[in-house]
Amino acid sequence: MVVVWALLLVGLGYLSARRDPPSVREQRSIGQATPVVDRATAQLLVAAGRDVVADIAGRTLDEGCRITPLRSGGVLYSELTLYTSEAGGPALLDRIAGALPGSYGARVRHDADQGTHALRADAGEFVTIRGRVDPPGAVILTVSTGCRPVDVQVADLAVGRPIDEEPMRVLAALGAAGVQSGRTVGVSCPVGSAMFTAHATGRVDGDRPFADALRPLRAGATVVLDTPERFAYRTETRGVVVQRGDDQVRVSVTAACAAG
């Protein structure tokens, strides 16, 4: 009787593993979670609206976490930064939370004493969203899977887009030296196309305001953020971010989703 009972339990466990939906994060792999991460990243861009400038950092797979003491895994991150007016970060977090699907349960906490502002949401299937204000004028959003089995190699959505050379044009206008191109990454748009961000860095001497140096390139554009360290503007089809740091200037150019 004991043997029969044991065999029954094993059989039920096998059927449950095959048929039942995952009930804990560790039962879903990185490959299974990747579409959820991409969908959540696209939802964040839609929720932010078209009057911000986006900088898509792309996917990053951080391996080496422990699922169990004997089993290793990885965490998939997707990060993007949104640029708005110098003091507009807290309001942007509120707007994103209000525009995300209700199933995400998005909520924002503003701590006046600490001067911090944080967004938390659940994209489903154990994928989390965290957001924070990075003053002046920036909101950083991170979508994360938590530690899971690694079953795929994570690649950028696409490379070799026409936008690849556009950060170089911005750096040339700034008189940059030692220019180096970076990644071109993207996320899918709601209408089926994709939004891409191309990156590049260079060394710029002097402290000439970005707004002055880039005036020939931004004719007709809307300036979103203008500080000594960060400058962002947008047109109907492009968003450009320029910022100083670590003795270099970093440029990102994002091709917006087609209006739909």
Image (spheres, helix red, strand yellow):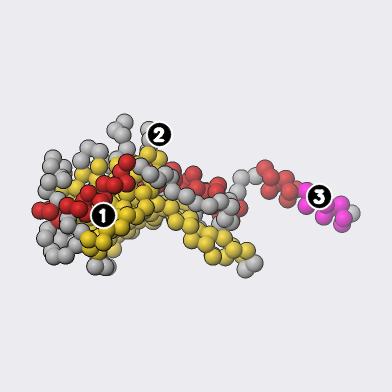
Q: Earlier in the sequence, mark 1 or mark 2?
A: 2
Q: Which residue is mark 1?
A: 251
Identify which residue is drawn at 62% across, 68% down.
69
Give the amino acid at mark 2.
Gly
Left or right: 182 in relation to 166: right
Of the numbered discs 3 and 2, the one sitting upstream in the chain is 3
Task: Give the mark toward the camera: 3 or 2.
Answer: 2
Q: Secondary structure at mark 2?
A: loop
- The single residue placed furthest to the right in the displayed view is 1
| Residue 238, x across and y down, in percent | 25, 42
Looking at the rendered image, the quarter that the C terminus falls into is top left
Magenta span:
2-11
Residue 215 visible in the snapshot: yes
Residue located beneath label 2 in the image: 192
**Tag nearer the camera, 1 or 3:** 1
Task: Inspect the image, locate mark 1, and give the three-letter code of the amino acid beneath it.
Answer: Val
Question: Taking 214 as reference, is 130 left or right?
Answer: right
What residue is shown with label 3? 8
